[in-house]
Amino acid sequence: MRVDEKIELLNRRAKLSLQTIPSYGPDVDLTNYIKDSTELKEVEDLKALPEDVVEKVKNIGIDLNSSSGTYMQVDHNLIYKKKLYPNVEILSLEDALNDKDFVEKYYWNLIDVGQDKFTAAAHLYGKGGYVIISKENSVTEFPIQACLFIKSKETFQAPHNIIVAEPGSTLHVVTGCATMPESVGLHAGITEFYVKRNSTVTFTMIHDWNRATHVRPRTAAVVEDGGTFINHYINLSTSGLDSLQSYPFVHLKGEKSRAFMSSIIVGRYSSHIDLGSAVKVSGRGSSAEIVSRTVSTDNSKIVARARIYSEAPNVKGHIECRGLILNDGSRIWTIPELDSTIKDVELTHEAAIGKLSEDIIFYLLTKGIGKDEAISMLVRGFLEVKVPSLPPLLEKQISVLMESATKFL
Amino acid sequence: MLLDIRNLTVEVEGKVVLKNLSLSIGFGETVLLMGPNGSGKSSLIYTLMGHPRYIVKEGSIVFKGKDVTSMSTEERVRLGLGAALQFPPKVYGLTLRALAKKIAKDDLEIETLASSLNLTNFLDREINVGFSGGEMKRAEIFLLLLQKPSLALLDEPDSGVDVENMVLVGNAIGKLLSDSGRTAIEKPSGLIVTHLGYISRYVLTHRTYIMQNGRIICYGPTENLVNDVLKRGFDWCTKCYGDRFPCTYVGDKI
């Protein structure tokens, strides 16, 4: 198919799907959001950013002094882009789409544009997005940073991001997404990952939305022989959010490929969060692990989904869903699913929901820890997930972030 | 008087666990509390620390001249009560070091103390997760030493501890309770619960109380009581009625 034919087909299918209600999560009326927002100009130095933006990005793990590459988008404007590794390309999607070969190989190949109204709207009305390509056998030590920010009122932010790890390369990406307190927004980013033979991608996403934000990211990855995809999602929503629904899908296509998907979710106020990970395993000898830690407070509702489907032998898969309900009236619902058409697999799951143990709180009180601090320490401990392959610096950064975010619980 | 417990009756989920119990500890004093399993020794520790499931029905607890009977655990700890529990819970996600750092700011003190209790390798492990019985005891005493309470409540510090580590634990408790760096009035006091009595070899105690069925039935000098009880069992104590000087029998005469 020619590139212009592909685009034409995508447009047509998207237009037909603008009313398609998604299978999960509450519906959102798109007409409230699809308007023009303030235009911001690209800046030379991240320090030239508006002060309120600078303050907010600190909460989502973006280091403005980072010696690594950075991409930053406010609403739907690219405002900063910096490339530091010679072996890692950082492009805006607009630039990347000039390359016909790229469009054919990577554009909308993993996610159906007609999946629901959000994918359709993202294609038709979304702007911006980053493309990160790590060259063959290259290794990044520091994570590439991408920051997506909603600042204007009633904004529709739907960047389309594409990440390609060429064979044998190692790439770490950290993405922070946030909204300014006064903004009202709908975020429906599209992200496609192409993890090629023997390459490793770690993708850490930190969200800090406000109470008037709806979030519907659509994410998919394909992993080739010997490849590893690690996705670590953190939503501490210090200021809550309205609703979030996402169900990233990973296809372990290659032999001995591997996926690790973790989500750390704190639900506050009346947030409705429906989040999961699904892995389809077609490559022999592959393994998948899905881990979630959820904490619900106030009137929040969290659905934690997880699904591993295997159609290849010698596959190992494990799902671990743990939830902590801090008060009555909030809700956690875990839905772990295992599915196989092959007998030679080892698929397991464990799920547990409970409260903080009174005996443990008492124990910490006897050691002179105040009650509020004891609860924070226990929640913080509960949310700890050991994510494989993360650079130590990023691990430390996440740890500091979680420390401060759980203080308010 | 540092601690004065008067006629204390305590219930847990409607069941009486302490009956009309009176006991007092002076400044700088250390006492032993002995009794068979289930006699209410640990219940007394939980009650003194203000565990919400232990409901005081009658009587009072006065600590440092203040009535703490209905005070929260936080307030009691702030006043100077501290405990090493018999069965401390496993605390997932929180390392021994992280908790130690909340109690004591001095890293050197933490390292030195951990080393003296053979706990250096446990500092970065989750509290009590995968610890043996003896390791848990040592970790509890380690935290209590950092806390420096005015009254240390030690629940069975000598059970489940092997011979080599008993020396470490015994000496550490001895050090905690004989802190010579403080003035007499600030010298820490101790209430040590034990059913084996080994700890009395390491710590100088002022007297021993014997408990049975939620009551104190007898008290007297440690050297007489501990040896007799270890030789003849607690039943002997109930039959004695305090006729043997110098013990004082305070239980019901049957």
Image: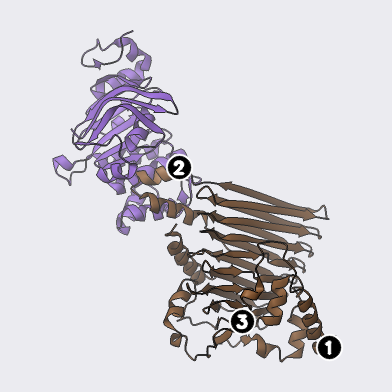
Chain colours: A brown, B purple
Q: Nearer the viewer, mark 3 or mark 1?
A: 3
Task: Using the numbered discs, state the Cα–Cα distance from disc 2 to disc 3 in whole angstroms.
Answer: 50 Å
Residue B174 rendering spot, x and y as whole percentages: 27, 39
Q: Amino acid at mark 3?
A: Lys
Q: Chain of mark 1?
A: A
Q: Is residue A90 left or right of residue A63?
A: right
Callout 2 secondary element: helix
Task: Tell me the number on the disc at residue A331.
Answer: none
N-terminal label among 3 and 1: 1
Instruction: Confirm whether circles 1 and 2 share one chain.
Output: yes
Q: Residue at x 52, y 82 (%)?
A: A68
Q: Nearer the viewer, residue A157 or A1?
A: A157
Label 3: which residue? Answer: A35
Task: Using the numbered discs, state the Cα–Cα distance from disc 3 to disc 1 in whole angstroms.
Answer: 32 Å
Figure check: A191 above or below A80: above
What is the residue that sits farthest to the top in this orientation?
B254
Q: Chain of mark 2?
A: A
Instruction: Confirm whether circles 2 and 3 share one chain.
Output: yes
Q: Amino acid at mark 1?
A: Arg
Task: Tell me the number on the disc at residue A2.
Answer: 1
Q: Is residue B117 visible?
A: no
Label 2: which residue? Answer: A358
Task: Using the numbered discs, state the Cα–Cα distance from disc 1 to disc 2 in whole angstroms.
Answer: 64 Å
Q: Residue at x 68, y 88 (%)?
A: A96
Callout 3 secondary element: loop
